Amino acid sequence: MADSLRLHQFAYLNRPDSRFSRLNDFHQGPEIQVFLFGFVGDLVSTRRTPFVLGLLLSLGATLFLALGSSLLLFLAARILEGLSTAVIATIGQALLHDTVGQENLGRAMGFSSLALSMALLLGPVVGGLLYEYCGYFMTFVPALIMLGVEIVLRAMLIEKRDGKKYRSGGRQLLDDSGEAGDGSGADQKEPRNNTASNNVLPSSPKSTTTGNFETTPPTARNPPHDPAETEPLLSSEQSEPSSAHPPPNAYSVILSSPRFLVALIGIFALGSIANGFDAILAPYIASTFNLGPHYVAVLFLAIAIPMLLSLLTGYLTDRYGSKPVASTGLAIAAPAIAALSLVGPGSAKPMLKLGGLLFAAGVGLALTTIPLRVDAAATIEDIERKRPGVFGGKGAYTKAFGMVNAMDAAGGMSGPLVAGYLKISLGWRGVVWIMGGVCLCLWVGVVGLTGRKASEPVEEGSERG
């Protein structure tokens, strides 16, 4: 909301036309470079540092928007917003996977998606009220407060991998000091001493006794060395191939999986369709039915409210797997979007029909997005299970989420452009038929290639990515 206010302020003060509205998409350009942050996220030893960096970038962008008074600062803020979104989305999803695991990833993504949907729905309302009664700067105060709290919490974050080290290190420390464990340290050390004192070498014919001491020849105390025991288990010739053949590039391994490609293409297509309606729905309603902006707002709510079903979608994904949930969503979205072509000037109750079809399309899209994201992570897990160590010791989840978020951003940028071009070239019916056809093609790919639940055993000879 605050971004739109600043945008309209510049458009009003500097240019009377709407050409500056194109700057509203400026933040999505850096998001396409999100895969770079995915690459860095798998290199660093902790995910906390890049996550805090993303929050600091978002804090700087918010301050630029709140305090800036020039178009240059506004552009810089939009670019920083794109960079921060790229970092936070990619590292955050990887951190989410590290924390809850693959089995609960759907529900965890459902919570995060619900928070995003609530912010998109309530942000304009809260921002408008603050702007009306408290002034322009106050629209940024809630964001600044939440960012400050978030930075403090993330600085205190203990990642799951570090928590395991602390717990195992604490147990080891207590065991060594004799203050914890099943038996005390003294009890554990005493048997070793008794055993050592009771282990008396049997006397040999060559051993001699002097007083109370038994003298054993050196050969008896130190048996001759076995040369085989000093040799390494793997000879230098056997260990050379690991350095001679470096591990394959992680991106080439991931992108060679048809299952992962279906998830990528699906995320791009869904982002294009959802954002494409932003470009064509309002002009179509205004020109065809001569309805005002409040009717357009109601129709946008019809397609946006189903996103609140993300918790249910996440639960169903964890319970039944990605394929049945995503295929059901696409089976709902494809005919609903295509049927929008039947609503024209001569239709009875067009608003009711458009609202119902857009709601059905929103339900279908909501049932598809989370399963595809979860299946992208499940693909990485299956690849590592089939080819242990192919991604190194730190895995490739950040790279995978980086590519997924990059495709989502690319869909958000290209969707309005492509939909607007198709609307001009083919008309309303042509563009919604193409959108419905894209959902149908994606349904075929999901049914054919999207994987099962990650907990199910994968057959050794399976070719499913």
Image: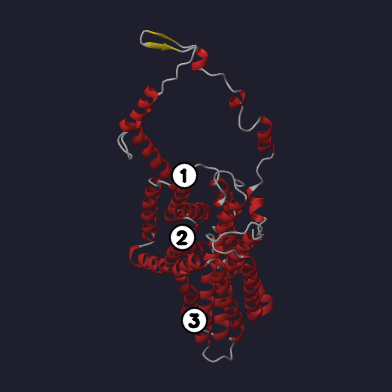
Residue type, numbered disc 1: Thr
Q: Which mark is residue 139?
A: none
Q: Are marks 3 and 2 in contact (CB under 8 Å)?
A: no
Circle 1 SS class: helix
Between tags 1 and 2, which lies in front?
2
Q: Is residue 30 visible?
A: no
What residue is rendered at 47% in x and 64% in y?
Answer: 4
**Numbered disc 3: secondary structure:** loop
- Tell me the number on the disc at residue 104: 2
Tag shown at residue 49? 1
Q: Is residue 190 left or right of residue 422?
A: left
Q: Nearer the viewer, residue 336 or 65?
A: 336
Question: In the image, residue 218 lies at what x, y percent?
Answer: 50, 13
Q: Nearer the viewer, mark 3 or mark 1?
A: 1
Give the residue pinned by disc 3. 292
Q: CA distance from mark 3 to mark 2?
A: 44 Å
Q: Is residue 294 left or right of residue 427?
A: left
The residues tagged by marks 1 and 2 sit, at their Cα atoms, a distance apart of 25 Å
Secondary structure of residue under mark 2: helix
**Residue at position x 38%, y 42% from top?**
167
Bin the neighbour count of mark 2 within 10 Å (Cα to Cα): few under 14, some 14-19, many 20 and up.
some
Q: Measuring 36% from the left and 32% from the top, which residue is drawn there?
A: 176
The answer to which image quadrant residue 450 occupies is: bottom right
Q: Residues within 10 Å of mark 3 (few under 14, many from 20)?
A: few
Please state the horizontal and vertical placement of residue 314, each as a whole percent of the image.
Answer: 47, 66
Q: Nearer the viewer, mark 3 or mark 2?
A: 2
Q: Residues within 10 Å of mark 1 (few under 14, many from 20)?
A: some
Q: Is residue 320 visible?
A: yes
